[in-house]
Amino acid sequence: MATRVVTSSRAMAAEADIVLNTASDATRAKAWLPEDGSRDYDIDLRADEGRVQWRTDGRAGDLRVTGNGSGASEAELRMEVDDDADIGEVREILDRALGALAAEVDQNFNVS
């Protein structure tokens, strides 16, 4: 079956390295990565490329993070889906995942 990649992005109120480290932490990853039932993730941090690759039995994708200066960054979450997948539904899943990642970053690294 053919697949395609769906993306969603979000600004993050932290430097790219902090976002990448939060995203690749196995304990925190379970709080933000899209659910697929297994909740068992294979996570590969590629800091030199500014990304985290992830895979489960049912899904795969990557998070790319670029710095925007002034302690901020932009995160783009990409996920492979079957051609017949509902793109709107997949984007909602990605948006929720990025929102959860932003909350993890805020909770763990930003001082109020």
Image (cartoon, rainbow, N blue to C red):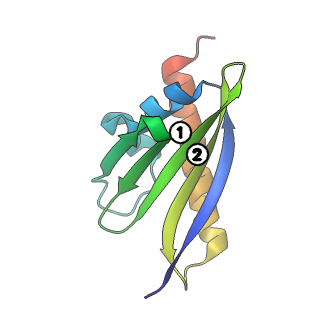
Identify which residue is drawn at 52% across, 18% down.
109
Q: Residue furthest top?
A: 112
x, y percentage for residue 59?
A: 40, 65
Identify which residue is drawn at 44% across, 35% down.
47
Dividing the picture into quarters, in which one does residue 90 lie?
bottom right
Mark 1 → mark 2, Cα distance in angstroms: 5 Å
Q: Disc 2 marks which residue?
A: 98
Q: Quadrant of the N terminus?
A: bottom left
Identify which residue is drawn at 50% across, 31% down.
104
x, y percentage for residue 102?
A: 58, 35
Contact (Cβ within 8 Å) of mark 1 with mark 2: yes
* Element marked by disc 2: helix
Q: Disc 1 marks which residue?
A: 101
* Up-down relation of residue 39 to residue 71 (above or below): below
x, y percentage for residue 86?
A: 60, 78
Q: Quadrant of the C terminus?
A: top right
Kind of residue indicated by mark 2:
Leu
Residue 5 image label: none
> 94 or 2, which lies in front?
2
Counting labels gives: 2
> 55 or 112, which lies in front?
55
* Element marked by disc 1: helix
Q: Tell me if mark 2 has few (under 14), some (14-19) or many (20+) residues whose alpha carbon lies within 10 angstroms of its own.
A: many
Kind of residue indicated by mark 1:
Leu
* Up-down relation of residue 80 to residue 85 (above or below): above
Instruction: Using residue 10 as the reference point, say whether residue 29 is left or right of it.
Output: left
Q: Tell me if mark 1 has few (under 14), some (14-19) or many (20+) residues whose alpha carbon lies within 10 angstroms of its own.
A: many
x, y percentage for residue 61?
A: 46, 59
Identify which residue is drawn at 67% across, 70% down.
88
Q: Residue furthest front?
A: 48
Instruction: Using residue 77 as the reference point, say whether residue 20 is left or right of it.
Output: left
